């Protein structure tokens, strides 16, 4: 998926995974020079979406900071890898949806922040649309 | 596991995360902007009120103003009051605040009279600014009076739909806004259900977006 000048993709085909399955992939952004990057944060997270307040939790988080000695080379893809939990499973309800995604945030020296997301499905709960008669 | 086309739950453009203050930008009247209003607030000694009925954009306007207020060096104590909150949920103790500071109260009409007096006294004695949103005017300089009309509501709905589809026409928006006494927030809540119903009955003509990039929930 490409947006916000960050390209994300899974190593495996598809974007639907089982609980307990390992996911891995890579992200790329080459629009910043090496010395312009302050930090990169990679999260695997879920959040609720619907009529009510948004709830969210981060399953896996990694921050690479240039200030802390992290090496961020925009010419090479960064990688993410994690084992997915058993819950919450993705859900496509009418009032509430549970969404999973890999989110990459890039912070530049100029104070700019760019976000890219790669949504995916965890589990195989029927959507309300599919379950409707 | 194979990858179906609907790899992620469909996005509803009227969900809370898309229509919350901050996600949905405030539409300033001609000739006004967040910067000009903060200038006006500053000229009024950092005291002001935003007045308007329910669902006309007061909280949305605040969300636009707060970054500008912070950018000019004011720290902000932001208090959001909801139904039945008669007292401030946080202690406004001037000595503990980084100066210069401004207390921002969204939903000022919720406060009891003693709480209002207490807040006003603390702000005056502590040299703090005070910016409120309220349904009825109080004795503070007027920053802006928010209004909602059918044209503006229709534009906002079109923007939420990314100008891709005509889920509802301008007449329908005007009718719904009238039914909801001009409260756009309630209209958007209704449209959430309309959108979901359209998905269920397969009658909607809107391509369902799977994800948006810049309107997500707060990240770690």
Image (cartoon, rainbow, N blue to C red):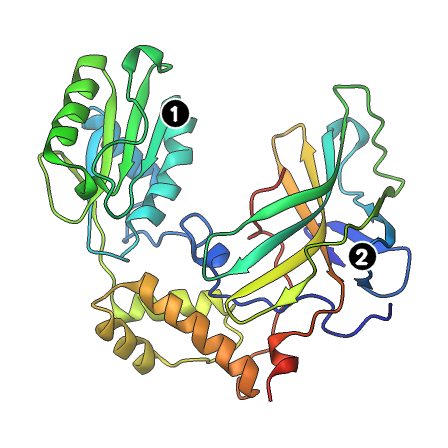
Is B160 left or right of B138, judged from the image as shown? right
Q: Which chain letter matches label 2?
A: A
Percent from the top left, x then y, of residue A7? 78, 52
**How many C-alpha atoms fall within 10 Å of the one at disc 1: few (<14), some, or many (≥20)?**
few
Q: What SS does tag 1 mark?
A: loop
Circle 1 is placed at which residue position?
A: B72
- With respect to residue A73, does A115 lie above or below? below
Residue at figure coordinates x 48%, y 62% from the top left: B15
Percent from the top left, x then y, of residue A10? 85, 56
Q: What SS does tag 2 mark?
A: loop
Does residue B205 appear in this view? no
Residue at figure coordinates x 79%, y 44% from the top left: A29
Circle 2 is placed at which residue position?
A: A19
- With respect to residue A21, does B106 lie above or below? above
Residue at figure coordinates x 38%, y 42% from the top left: B63
Real-space Cα separation, disc 2 to disc 1, in angstroms: 48 Å
């Amino acid at each position: 998926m490409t947006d916000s000048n960050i390209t994300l993709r899974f190593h495996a085909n598809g974007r639907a995974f089982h609980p307990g399955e390992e996911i891995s992939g890579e992200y790329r952004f080459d629009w910043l020079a090496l010395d312009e990057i302050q930090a990169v944060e990679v999260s695997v997270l879920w959040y609720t979406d619907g009529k009510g307040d948004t709830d969210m939790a981060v399953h896996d988080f990694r921050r690479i900071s240039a200030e802390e000695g992290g090496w961020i080379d925009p010419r090479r893809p960064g990688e993410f890898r994690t084992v997915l939990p058993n819950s919450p499973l993705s859900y496509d309800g009418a009032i509430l949806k549970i969404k999973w995604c890999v989110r990459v945030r890039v912070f530049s020296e100029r104070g700019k922040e760019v976000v890219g997301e790669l949504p995916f499905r965890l589990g195989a709960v029927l959507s309300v649309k599919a379950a409707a008669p | 596991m194979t990858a179906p086309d609907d790899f992620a739950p469909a996005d509803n453009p009227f969900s809370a995360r898309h229509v919350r203050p901050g996600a949905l930008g405030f539409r300033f009247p001609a000739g006004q902007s967040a910067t000009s209003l903060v200038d006006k607030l500053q000229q009024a000694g950092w005291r002001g009120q935003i007045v308007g009925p329910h669902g006309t954009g007061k909280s949305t306007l605040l969300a636009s103003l707060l970054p500008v207020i912070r950018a000019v060096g004011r720290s902000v104590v932001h208090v959001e009051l909801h139904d039945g909150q008669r007292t401030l949920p946080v202690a406004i103790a001037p000595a503990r605040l980084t100066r210069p500071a401004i207390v921002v109260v969204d939903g000022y009409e919720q406060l009891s009279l003693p709480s209002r007096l207490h807040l006003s006294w603390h702000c005056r004695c502590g040299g703090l600014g005070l910016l409120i949103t309220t349904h009825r005017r109080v004795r503070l300089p007027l920053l802006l009076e928010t209004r909602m009309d059918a044209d503006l509501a229709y534009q906002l709905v079109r923007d939420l739909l990314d100008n891709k589809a005509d889920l509802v026409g301008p007449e329908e928006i005007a009718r719904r806004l009238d039914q909801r006494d001009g409260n756009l927030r309630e209209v958007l809540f209704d449209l959430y259900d309309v959108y979901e119903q359209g998905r269920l009955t397969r009658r909607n003509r809107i391509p369902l977006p799977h994800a948006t990039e810049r309107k997500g929930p707060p990240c770690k």
